Amino acid sequence: MSLPTPPSSHTKPITSAQSLPARFAPETAKPASFAGHKVTKQEPIPKQIPQPEEQKISKSKRLKNKLINAFSIKPAPPQYKYHATVSSGNQTTHIWTNSPNLKVWTPDPKARMQTNAPAPNFHHFNQVPYQGNLSQMMIPGLGVLNFNQPVFYQQMSSQPPVWHPPAQLTAQLAPPIQYAKPAPVYNHIYQDEAARLNIAKTRFTERFHISEATVKKLEQKSDIEQRKFSELPQGINSVVAQLKSTHLKQISSALNNHQTNLAHALPNTHTSIEEQGKTFVNNLESGMRAIDVILKTGQQYYSKEDIQTFKDIRRQLSVERSLVVQVMMQSDANGLGDKLNWQTATDFMRVGYQLIPATVEHLSTLDDSSLETSKPFGKGMTHTVSKLTYKHDGAETKKLFKAEDAVDKSGYERITKKGAYLDSSRPQFALRNLAAQNLQPLLGLNMVPKMELATHKGQIGLMMDEAKGTTAFPTAKSGISEKLKNNTGFANNVVSDLIKAEWFDCLCGQKDRHPGNYLINPDTGHVSLIDNDQSFYPGDTSVAKNSTAASEGNWRSPWPGLPALIDRETFTRLQAIKEQDIRQKLSGLLGKSEVDSTLKRLEELKQHAIKLEKEGKVIDDWSSWKNDAKPALGASDFLKQHGKQQSYLNALEGALKAKTVSVPPAPKQAQPSFSSLR
């Protein structure tokens, strides 16, 4: 296939999808060869291109034309100073130009070129049309190049192209040239309504974990490539170095800008949140697009380790973009700017929280800006607790912090009845702890340490006061066993608090109150309840029944069933609780089904308490109460003989007798069991 002859130098150049592309640049590169290419010199070709033969016409018309030509200005035919012949297999391409710096790209690494140009550059590339656009080629490491330089050439020809005046050009083009459509304008994700709706219903739980060291390394590599570009002679290597530097700088800038953006306070109006979120998305997408160019066109210019790093960064930027869009779509987030910045707001989305005042009001004013020290405090099977020390206005505050889980990994689902478990994709453990804290005043309790939401290292979690006391483990150091035997006042306080804890946990639907999940003050016997993650299951419409089968040695299953005794204050307060009290205390923390299940357990507990009152098992004084049976037993002895094995006092006694172990025994099976769910 041959193109029509070229137009004058003032007419738009013509390109062909099946012709060999060529580029020219005002450079002074030395003659070069590439990957087997051969470049040789040839003698200059005639500068004057012959005019086309005149057609046979009548004498009168010929005379008329001569007169017109005599008195008209004739366009001068183009003159070409340089010529190149490119041979590829059995195909020959001729190129004419006036540029001394001839730059030719060919998809054939064995192609040869002869030219009289003083500074030719001959390069090989993989000829891949960019997104179907034949006038744009994708070149590894360079991205997309537009072949639109003033080049005239013709395939399978041994003669220079014949010149025609511009007036005759249009008529000779058959069929007309179909110019490629311009690339579409880039659409941001927030401009795509379908994409926004898909993001709204999708969970994105990955933590943004790109370190400062990674960003610094990208910046250093960008500087190295920029120096290469400055030092290398103009050519393929210098162009690659320049583009690598540009891409690496674009990625590192997007990462640095994102960290800065996350520190901004959340605007107080929905419109402002939308507008600010768009600028954050634009920044993230600039980094994503730079990585896309590398992954599509430049993988051979980077190591495998670098390519994997780019893929990881690309994925994380995409997740961050989706979290920002989710914040933008939170219509009830108005007026939260005094409590939230974008870092906390996006982490709310990550863990499955809603940006509503009823939830955000539990957020602490303490944050890492006043953090003095952070030390590990303890580690269970699923969580690590840190001890944080804050310093503000000269005052020192110590708190414990447990990061929130985005998804449930506890394994508790296998020991609950079908349909009863919490939402594994949104466990919201911290909110369950806050819900327990909110309910305890209804029963007149002060057993759950003060808790609130907080952020630490950019992650939302539960911040709490450190409870005083010790668990039953290790037995040798706790001293609890001896005090229970020898100190009546201490023993009565422990028994009283454990019974109250049973009623409270039954109301909360607690599934994990083993002796390792409460503390006993060795001086007073007061009990503090910790770790309320496994509570308020939506399917628990009744109090869980005790089970003797679900145990490991002395480690009893962690639910006692309906309590065997109740004290007078708990009885009175329980009967006084109304539906609106429960709904108000749990608003913004739990879902509707979880609140409804709590109300059903409340009614069951009220009826059970009335039954105990009729049986004379409501205790007014723990030190003097005796049961009606013979022999008459005090509260502690009554529970030991008539209480369930899983009642908290009996579970504690069993744990204290296990002198050979300091922690619950490890499970034999791969699946988690009671002893591993700490």
Image (cartoon, rainbow, N blue to C red):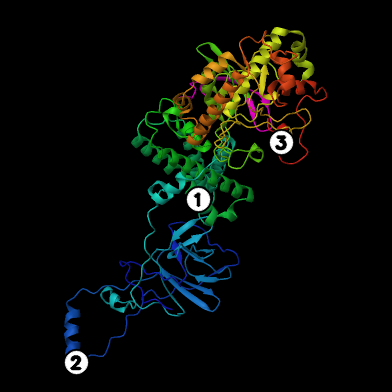
Which comes before the other along the chain, label 2 or label 1?
2
Closer to viewer: mark 2 or mark 3: 3
Relative depth, front residue between 625 and 477? 625
CA distance separating discs 2 and 1:
64 Å
CA distance separating discs 2 and 3:
111 Å
Q: Which residues are magenta?
A: 361-385
Label 2: how many Cα within 10 Å (few below 14, some 14–19, many 20+): few
Quadrant where the image shows the C terminus: top right
Label 3: how many Cα within 10 Å (few below 14, some 14–19, many 20+): many
Indicate the position of residue 526 as horizontal and vertical percent values: 65, 13
Q: Is residue 375 left or right of residue 130?
A: right
Indicate the position of residue 601 as horizontal and vertical percent values: 55, 29
Does the magenta-highlighted stretch encompass residue 379? yes
Relative depth, front residue between 665 and 600? 600
Label 1: how many Cα within 10 Å (few below 14, some 14–19, many 20+): many
Relative depth, front residue between 631 and 619? 631
Relative depth, front residue between 348 and 190? 348
Q: Which residue is mark 2?
A: 59
Label 1 element class: helix
Residue 489 visible within the image: yes
Amino acid at circle 2: Lys
Label 3 element class: loop
Q: Which residue is mark 1?
A: 243
Q: Which residue is mark 3?
A: 673
Amino acid at circle 1: Leu
Indicate the position of residue 354 as horizontal and vertical percent values: 46, 34
